[in-house]
Image (cartoon, rainbow, N blue to C red):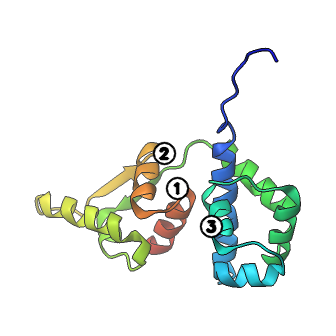
Amino acid sequence: MSGVAVDPDFDQPFREALGARLRLLRRGRRLSRERVCALLHNDMSIGTLGSYESGARRLTVSRLVELCEVLGTTAHDVLADVHRDLRRPGPRIRIRLRVITRARDPELRPLRAWAEARVALLPPGPEPEIELDEAALREAATLCGLSPTELLHLLREESW
């Protein structure tokens, strides 16, 4: 061997983006992890599926194809979406704090508490907006137990 060390997590951003995409597809079809595992007719556990969705575990091509079939899509389309997600400039969103304080999704509860505390400190006046850049989105997503992609998706749903 050449003695060059390879970072074992070199593909972490890809795994996280792929996992987030699979989770969005599963939720879009209103399928629980339990239901997906049952539809696969194989030995995949709910925990394994969760580790794929979080990006903690690498996914084989054959597993990806099986999952995509259950989710009503193709591996080709999922990989194209992931590639596009990774090539975009860092995500950011501009949102009114009141949208966050009124968020109903239980997964946004920690972010809602943060926004409520922030609004309480502001003087009366026009409704404040904040811009969450990539780093802030990543922190807010971690706070909520979500990926940045999932957080963006939920915030956009709440703002409509």
Confirm or deny contact between disc 1 and disc 2 (CB under 8 A): yes
Whether residue 31 is visible to the viewer of this picture, yes or no, is no
Taking 2 as reference, is 92 above or below it?
A: below
Q: Which of the pair 85/98 is nearer the observer?
A: 85
x then y, percent, for residue 27: 63, 77
Q: Earlier in the sequence, mark 3 or mark 1?
A: 3
Q: Which of the pair 21/90 is nearer the observer?
A: 21
Amino acid on which disc 3 is placed? Gly
Q: In the displayed structure, does residue 8 sit left or right of residue 63? A: left
Whether residue 95 is visible to the viewer of this picture, yes or no, is yes
Q: In the displayed structure, does residue 155 sit left or right of residue 73? A: left
Q: Identify the residue at horizontal 55%, vertical 63% (top origin).
A: 150
Disc ID at residue 134: 2
Disc ID at residue 50: 3
Q: Which of the pair 13/60 is nearer the observer?
A: 60
Q: Earlier in the sequence, mark 3 or mark 2?
A: 3
Q: In the displayed structure, does residue 10 sit left or right of residue 98? A: right
Q: Identify the residue at horizontal 13%, vertical 58% (top origin).
A: 121
Q: Earlier in the sequence, mark 1 or mark 2?
A: 2
Amino acid on which disc 2 is placed? Glu
